Image (cartoon, rainbow, N blue to C red):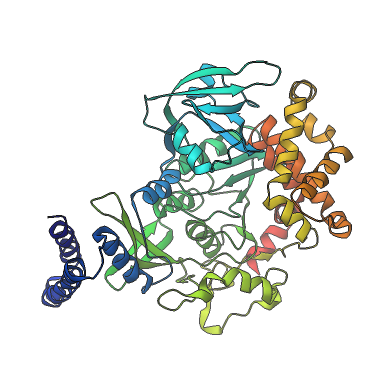
Amino acid sequence: MMKNNLLGAIILFIFTFSSANAQQKVNEDARKLSLALYAISNFYVDETDEKKLVEDAIIGMLEKLDPHSNYSDAEETKDLTEPLESNFDGIGIQFNMLTDTLYVIQVISGGPSEKVGLMAGDRIILVDDTIIAGVKMKNTDIMKRLKGPKGTEVRVKVKRSGVKDLLEFKIIRGKIPIYSLDASYMIDKTTGYIRLNRFAVSTTQEFKEALAKLKKQGLKSLILDLQGNGGGYLHVANELADEFLGDGKLIVYTQGDKQPRSDAYATQKGDFENGKLVILVDESSASASEIVSGAVQDWDRGVIVGRRTFGKGLVQRPIPLPDGSMIRLTVARYYTPSGRNIQKPYTKGNDKEYNSDLIDRYNRGELMSADSIHFPDSLKFNTLVSKRTVYGGGGIMPDVFIPFDSTRYTDYHRKVAALGLINRVSMNYLDKNRKEISKKYSKINVYKDGFEVTDDMLQELIELAKEDNIEFNEEQYNKSKSLISLQIKALIARDLFDMNEYFLIINDENESLKEALRIINSPGYYEKVLSD
């Protein structure tokens, strides 16, 4: 019976997405596929798993198409979609692992944990009588124990600094918001900064609220940080671009062999159609980030600063399957208003060169120099107002290039960062000094101006690294020392205040941001970039 249901589901799926003219051919292919599965299931020498056979067949087909068509099982599908849906069911904490113990970094305001009295700095030792401390449990396994349907109960026991015995809390799980906005603050009297980490259901509303708040503080110019933003929902990208572009202006259009052209236009009055706009991008800015930056660039609405973006110009349609799994099938390409398809080149199937593209860019020197990037004339386009030259064929090339600063990033830094040792030093310090530092630095501007990472903290990092068999390299350490100190200071700010304050500290060394400020504040510079 199970075999018949599986075969029926496969055939129904194929029939549903086929045209009438191709029905006979599809019938033949469907019978061929079903006969192969039937033969393997009934005649193969060893026992077979029909569900896995079907999944392997789907994966095999998708791998032959393009790098972004893929299959996810039910659990993977939930993990993929949850961050974009803007909430999940849980207890409402941000945590990190410190020497195999769950350390509470932040308690989400208004969430279930805050309501029962859980505090930043608490160490969770037991979850429902299961010890999770000191047992090297995976983060995913811990999350499974803390997450659960809204209204269900979980009991935790925590170790709190200064309290002898474990404290027990009964927490009723609830809806926990996931924010796509990392930070928003005024950099100077008239320039605001907003950073987005993804394009999720709530992104537009988060952006509008942050922008309105900054306008009340005097915002006239805006820096939108999309560095490292890998994208999200297409319609959300359109909504965000609509905030910057005038009514009726084309934002993006999509088209595929079986998908007719579909245009998305700016509609209602946007909240920031006037004023200087600079968008920060890098090699990890992809998909929805490229839609927004591409539309802004093509209409000469703002200046793009940073490095060439990832180059994902393929549109995936989610196709849910009956068991909760999902196919994300590429159905179209998207094009910027000037007609650029910014999808980087790929060959059909599992393209190893495609997957190693960012490494190849680094090896070619592209991240350090714009001169190493060469576009053929066939990919040349013009912006729609100033007629500036822009290029398609692999990401959005910024108007102002900022090289990657490799001088402070050494092997020693990469090793201590990868093992979480920089994070551990910051948590250790805050754990020992939380009361004192909270009292001394009650406001972020006081902390930013007054707090300094001490030699003792840096020495602790060196000792922790030695314990993890990382050999001390004095030359590399000295090169990375200022970066390590900045990261420790920013992490303490995050744990003491919030993520907003982390970026307020770490952005002191953001070269793209510094250039954005120069473009905005230097007389005539902004206008010159948009007219050349």
> Residue 2, can we see it?
yes
Note whether 241 is above or below 458 in the view shown.
Answer: below
For the N terminus, give its image quadrant.
bottom left
The one nearer the camera, 178 or 249, is: 178
Residue 532 lies left or right of residue 330; in this view the side is: right
For the C terminus, give its image quadrant.
bottom right
The one nearer the camera, 97 or 117, is: 97
Where does the image place residue 211, in percent across and percent down from the top left? 56, 39
The one nearer the camera, 77 or 249, is: 77
Note whether 88 is above or below 118 in the view shown.
Answer: below
Q: Residue at x 61, y 50 (%)?
A: 225
Outermost bottom residue:
377
Residue 5 lies left or right of residue 370; in this view the side is: left
Where does the image place residue 483, in percent across and percent down from the top left? 79, 50
Residue 190 lies left or right of residue 80; in this view the side is: right
> Residue 110, can we see it?
no
Where does the image place residue 478, in percent across and percent down from the top left? 87, 55
Outermost front residue:
45
The image quarter containing residue 500 is top right
